[in-house]
């Protein structure tokens, strides 16, 4: 088993997350794509932990899981707030800050 | 020895198929809860990959936090909001967008993979990273980031409560 397979999987997942963020309008899909990107970083950290023979990578990945949890709580709260106000999940509809005048 | 290698490769391929299939379902499904189930499958596959990488504690933490808390919380929110067809965004050219973006990002993926393969080609021989090793490191070398993360979690919790709170009292005034 060589680490390059894990590297390939991590880069593919990162790119799928990036595609999801750019191409979709649904707020939930954007949120889950961000989570997927962070999780691919987690996979990379765990792989490097084994490649370098140092358990610190696993510890960083563990801390990153906590950061992902915090991000999930905030993002879901924002989605609920926005949905209560506008009754839509379309990210293009939330353009209040872009009105210049 | 080759037998173990083949077995590992098979398990890796199955888990990788789970993850890629789940994430592709996630970004392409129209209904939000189908996306959430794709995300669930991807996170379960990731926990399996962690176990394959001998990061046992990380695999357990992934199942407990990511699958048990984050994904279930997302599904719960999606089912609570219960968005009707007209509340979902109208995306007539969704697959065109996805394919176009994928073509745009493909060179970046290639670059990322090539940069990552500059790293060592073999795994170091290392005993399994169990909770004992992780706990010792977490409370000696990584104790300051650990405390910062705990403050971050507290702040995020307060922020989530403030943002999602009902503004009924404010509306009456």
Image (tube, rainbow, N blue to C red):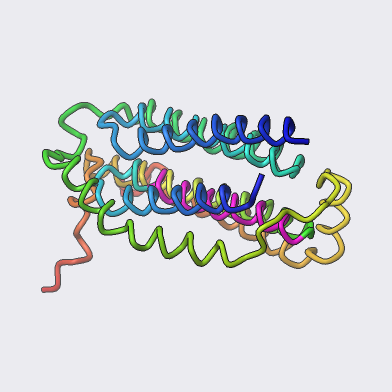
Q: Nearer the viewer, residue B11 or A74?
A: B11
Magenta stretch: helix, strand or loop mostly = helix
* Left or right of B80 on screen, residue B158: right
Name the side, left or right, on which B147 lies relative to B38: right
Residue B110 seen anywhere in this rendered image of the structure: yes
- Residue in the picture at 36% in, 45% down: A79
Residue B71's place in the image compared with A34, above or below, is above
Q: Nearer the viewer, residue B82 or B133?
A: B133
| Residue A99 position by quadrant | bottom left
- Quadrant that contains the C terminus of chain A: bottom left
- Residue A51 in the image: x percent, y percent? 71, 57
Q: Find the magenta span and give its range.
A: A31-52
Residue B64 point in image, percent of width and height? 66, 34
Q: Percent position (x, y) of residue B129? A: 81, 47
Towards the viewer: A23 or B140: A23
Observer able to see residue B158: no
Residue name at image x 27 percent, y 42 percent: A26
Q: Examine the structure image and report whether residue A91 is included in the region drawn in magenta.
A: no
**Relative to B82, is B156 above or below?**
below
Is B72 left or right of A52, judged from the image as shown? left
> How many numbered discs?
0
**Residue sitting at x 30%, y 46%:** A82
């Amino acid at each position: 088993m060589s680490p390059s397979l894990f590297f390939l999987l991590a880069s593919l997942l990162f790119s799928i997350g990036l595609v999801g963020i750019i191409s979709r309008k649904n707020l939930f899909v954007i949120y889950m794509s961000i989570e997927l990107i962070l999780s691919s970083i987690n996979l990379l950290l765990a792989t490097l932990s084994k490649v370098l023979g140092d358990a610190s990578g696993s510890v960083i990945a563990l801390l990153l899981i906590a950061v992902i949890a915090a991000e999930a709580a905030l993002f879901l709260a924002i989605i609920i707030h926005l949905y209560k106000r506008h009754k839509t999940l379309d990210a293009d509809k939330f353009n209040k800050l872009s009105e210049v005048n | 020895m080759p037998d173990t290698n083949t077995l590992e490769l098979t398990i890796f391929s199955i888990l990788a198929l789970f993850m890629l299939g789940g994430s592709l379902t996630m970004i392409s499904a129209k209904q939000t809860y189908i996306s959430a189930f794709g995300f669930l499958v991807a996170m379960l596959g990731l926990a399996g990959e962690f176990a394959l990488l001998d990061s046992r504690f990380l695999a357990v933490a992934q199942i407990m936090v990511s699958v048990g808390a984050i994904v279930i919380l997302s599904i719960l929110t999606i089912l609570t909001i219960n968005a009707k067809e007209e509340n979902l965004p109208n995306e007539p050219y969704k697959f065109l967008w996805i394919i176009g973006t994928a073509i745009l990002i493909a060179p970046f993926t290639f670059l990322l993979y090539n940069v990552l393969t500059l790293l060592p080609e073999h795994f170091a021989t290392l005993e399994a990273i169990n909770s004992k090793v992780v706990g010792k490191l977490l409370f000696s070398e990584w104790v300051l980031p650990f405390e910062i993360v705990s403050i971050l979690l507290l702040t995020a919790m307060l922020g989530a409560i403030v943002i999602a709170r009902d503004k009924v009292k404010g509306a009456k005034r």
